[in-house]
Image (cartoon, rainbow, N blue to C red):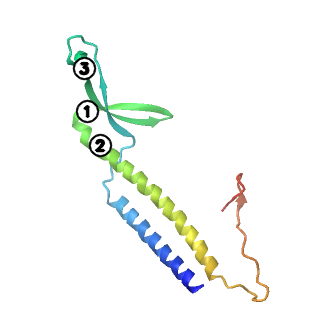
Amino acid sequence: MGERTSRLRQRLRQAAEQQQGHIERILGEDPTLIRGSFGTRSRVCGNPGCHCARGERHTSKYLTATAGGKVRQVHVPASDEELVAAGVARYRRYRRMRKRLAELGALQLELVDELGQSLLLPYPPEDPLPPASRRGRKVQDGSRRS
C-alpha cells in the first residue's frame, strides 16, 4: 500500500505542476486572440493585358472562420497581416493548452480516485464493507453523471 500510494501522490503532484505551468503560459500570453485560419488566395482578374493572364496570379490574404454555421472569409489588408497572423497563432496555442488542461484535469481526478482507493482501510477486517458504488444519474451510454 505504501509504495503505490507514494507513486500516486508523485504522479498527482506532477500533473498539478504541469497544469500550473499551462495556466501560467495562458496568463503570460498576449491577450489578443483571433479565431480562424489565416492564408493566401490567388486569383485571375480577367483583364487580358494583366500579368495574371500570363500565369502570375494576384494574391491576397484572408482570415477564414465559421460564424453561425457558415464559413466566412474576410480580406486582410497588408497593414494588418502581422497582427492577424500572430493573433491566429496565439489562438491555436491557447486551444492546445486548453485541451491539455482538460486532459490534465481528467488525469488528476483519476489519480485522486486511485489514491482514495489505495488509502481505504477495509473494515471490519474479517468481513469488509464493499467499495462505494458511483453515485449520480445514469446517462444514455450506461455511465453515470455526477
Q: How many angstroms separate mark 2 from mark 3 (CA)?
A: 27 Å
The percent position of residue 66, horizontal first and vertical second, equals: 45, 36
> Which of the 4 quarters of the picture holds residue 4?
bottom right
Residue at the spot of label 1 = 77
Q: Amino acid at mark 3?
A: Gly
Q: How packed is label 3: few (under 14 Cα within 10 Å), some, or many (20 or more)?
A: few
Q: Earlier in the sequence, mark 2 or mark 3?
A: 3
Q: How many angstroms separate mark 2 from mark 1 (CA)?
A: 12 Å
* SS of the residue under disc 3: loop
Establish if 22 lies above or below 38: below
Asked whether disc 3 touches disc 1, contact meaning CB atoms under 8 Å apart, the reply is no
Closer to us: 130 or 1: 1
Closer to us: 38 or 6: 6
Q: How many angstroms separate mark 3 from mark 1 (CA)?
A: 23 Å
Q: Amino acid at mark 1?
A: Pro
3 vs 1, front mark: 3
Residue at x 79% of width, y 85% of height: 127
The percent position of residue 5, horizontal first and vertical second, equals: 56, 81
Residue 126 shown left or right of residue 102 in the figure: right
The disc label shown at residue 85, or none: 2
Closer to us: 118 or 25: 118
Q: How packed is label 2: few (under 14 Cα within 10 Å), some, or many (20 or more)?
A: some
The percent position of residue 77, horizontal first and vertical second, equals: 25, 32
